[in-house]
Image: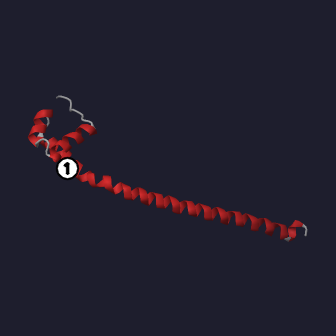
Amino acid sequence: MGKRRAFTAEFKLQVVLDVISGRKSNAEVCREYGLAPAVVAAWKEQFNERAPGIFARGRGEAGDQQRIADLERLVGRLTLELELAKKVSSIWASLSPRSGR
């Protein structure tokens, strides 16, 4: 049995864009590249399923930036609280009766 051909993502994209844009028909693409119609149909289906995700990423990145900013604020607040706790602890330790005062 022969080996299966492997196609790059760029090649698949070019084939799908040729068909979707109307530059070439499905049959023309299949003849030109020696592809089965089912293969081209599967690539078009994958493209149609994943294409909306390209535009959704921009919103995800903005959400990520907001999450990073919130976490940075939290780290800053916790750092201040820790410093305050250290100062109070050192003052408390110096005022305790065990320190000899």
Residue 98 vs residue 27, the one in the foreground: 27
Vertical comparison of 16 with 68: above or below = above
Mark 1 crowdedness (10 Å alpha carbons): few <14, some 14-19, many ≥20: few
- Amino acid found under the numbered disc labelled 1: Glu
Which residue in the protein does label 1 denote? 45
Vertical comparison of 65 with 93: above or below = above
Q: What residue occupies the far left of the structure in this picture?
A: 27
Q: Secondary structure at mark 1?
A: helix
- Would residue 56 be found to the left or right of residue 41 on screen? right
Residue 38 vs residue 19, the one in the foreground: 19
- Would residue 88 be found to the left or right of residue 99 on screen? left
Q: Position of residue 39 (x, y in %)?
A: 16, 41
**Number of numbered discs:** 1
Q: Position of residue 10 (x, y in %)?
A: 27, 38
Q: Quadrant of the C terminus?
A: bottom right
Residue at image coords 47%, 58% = 65
Q: What residue occupies the far top of the structure in this picture?
A: 2
Quarter of the figure with residue 94: bottom right
Quarter of the figure with residue 15: top left
Residue at image coords 79%, 65% = 90
